[in-house]
Amino acid sequence: MKPFTLALLSFIFLFSCKEKQQKINHPINYIIASKSDNIKRVLNSITNHEVQFRYTEIKKTNGVYVFNNFDFNTNSNNYFYPASSVKLPIAVLTLEKIFESEGYTKDTEFFIEGDTLKTTFAKEITKLFAVSDNDAYNRLFEFLGQDYINKKLKDKGINNVRIAHRLSTDNADNVTTKPLVIYTNDSTTINTNAIINSPIAPLQLDKIKKGIGYINEDEVLQNQPFDFSFKNYYSIDAQQQVLQRIIYPESFSNEQQFNLYLDDLSFLKKAMSNTPKDAGYTDSTYYDSYVKFFMYGDTKKPIPGNIKIYNKVGYAYGTLTDCAFIEDTKNDIRFMLTATILVNSNGVYNDNTYEYESVGIPFLAELGREYYNYNLQKKQN
């Protein structure tokens, strides 16, 4: 399915008022015909918002799940900052590296050289999804290293991705990782060596420089575009490729799958679908949709028990992203949705003036609801 581009929008809108059945027949037309102000105000300004999304239908054919993708404005050459969405591949590759190891499991305790926290891989993965903990991501990043991450993804046929740095910490892009001390039992430890990774090369992508200015580390406004060429890169296509291999591994060859113990895969899926309270967070700050933008991101009400959202969000530098498998066990509905939107109307980066709550999250929440309703209507016809 070829992506919808800006040039096609004027043509598509001519058909937005046709009868309901015709809208339902194509999932992109269904969104374009939406009467929601949260959708319309974004689609009326998609150049400013750099919107990309992919909706995926899932069908079982001859015992194998197959994916039918419908793209809106997706282009792997058009860069967007993925923020915390990169935590999903780090989580699954941590479990794969443990699978390849001898003498320890996801429940093995460890600490990072220079860190004060003794923890387990399972605890860090849980925090990574439940509240999008940056320190948890950084600890797992030290365990893996950039070269391991990028080689593993490439070997599985996942392209248009480059993981280069840690998140929200000093020396984020240091190519040398810190050693780990891993406890194989109460009295025996394994001391890993620091990993020296390849130098980080600048990305050669469109829209890699954004905006009209940015606030630098000295809190001084720089009147030039913000350069993302040394940042992480994780395209819409790559995000769904990772998600599909986790939710439906049997749809891929052995070479394309992640190598995990079955109980580790079950643990990962549970961590992805957990709400903060499921993971033990009782603070009212961490409501059910704290890191689930689709369908419920614009409300603090509990998510119904029959709705399971296996996802990872990202938000930083005015960019919001969500990659999710959404399942309604009561109504037998399941689909995948990945989307990104830029909400930085003043064009200045690092000033913490972004329209997350007023534009970005309402759009993503409504997009998820629209596709859920799309599936409900298909069931009724």
Image: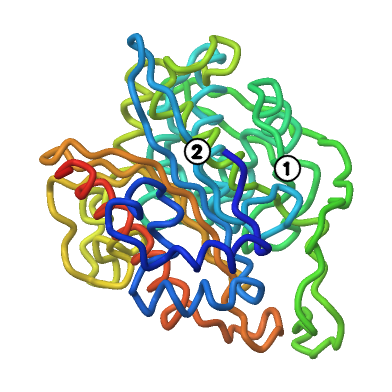
Front residue (pair 70, 193): 70
Q: Residue at x 73, y 27 (%)?
A: 151
In the image, taking residue 85 as reference, residue 370 lies left or right, namely: left
Q: Residue at x 86, y 82 (%)?
A: 224
Mark 2 Cα-neighbour bin, 10 Å: few <14, some 14–19, many ≥20: some
Residue 175: quadrant of the picture: top right
Q: Position of residue 270 (x, y in %)?
A: 29, 36
Question: Marks 1 and 2, how far apart in space?
Answer: 23 Å
Residue where numbered disc 2 is placed: 69
Q: Residue at x 63, y 49 (%)?
A: 114
Front residue (pair 156, 86): 156
Q: Position of residue 244 (x, y in %)?
A: 46, 31
In the image, taking residue 377 as reference, residue 213 lies left or right, namely: right
Q: Mark 1 or mark 2: which comes first in sequence?
A: 2
The quarter in which the C terminus is drawn is: top left
Q: Position of residue 166 (x, y in %)?
A: 66, 52
In the image, taking residue 189 as reference, residue 351 lies left or right, namely: right
Residue 241: quadrant of the picture: top right
Q: Position of residue 45 (x, y in %)?
A: 58, 77
Residue where numbered disc 1 is placed: 162
Residue 357: quadrant of the picture: bottom left
Q: Residue at x 54, y 77 (%)?
A: 44
The quarter in which the N terminus is drawn is: top right
Mark 1 Cα-neighbour bin, 10 Å: few <14, some 14–19, many ≥20: many
The coloring applied to the image is rainbow
Residue type at mark 2? Asn
Q: Secondary structure at mark 1?
A: strand
Residue type at mark 1? Arg
Q: Is the residue under label 2 in contact with that under label 1 (CB below 8 Å)?
A: no
Front residue (pair 358, 45): 45
| Mark count | 2
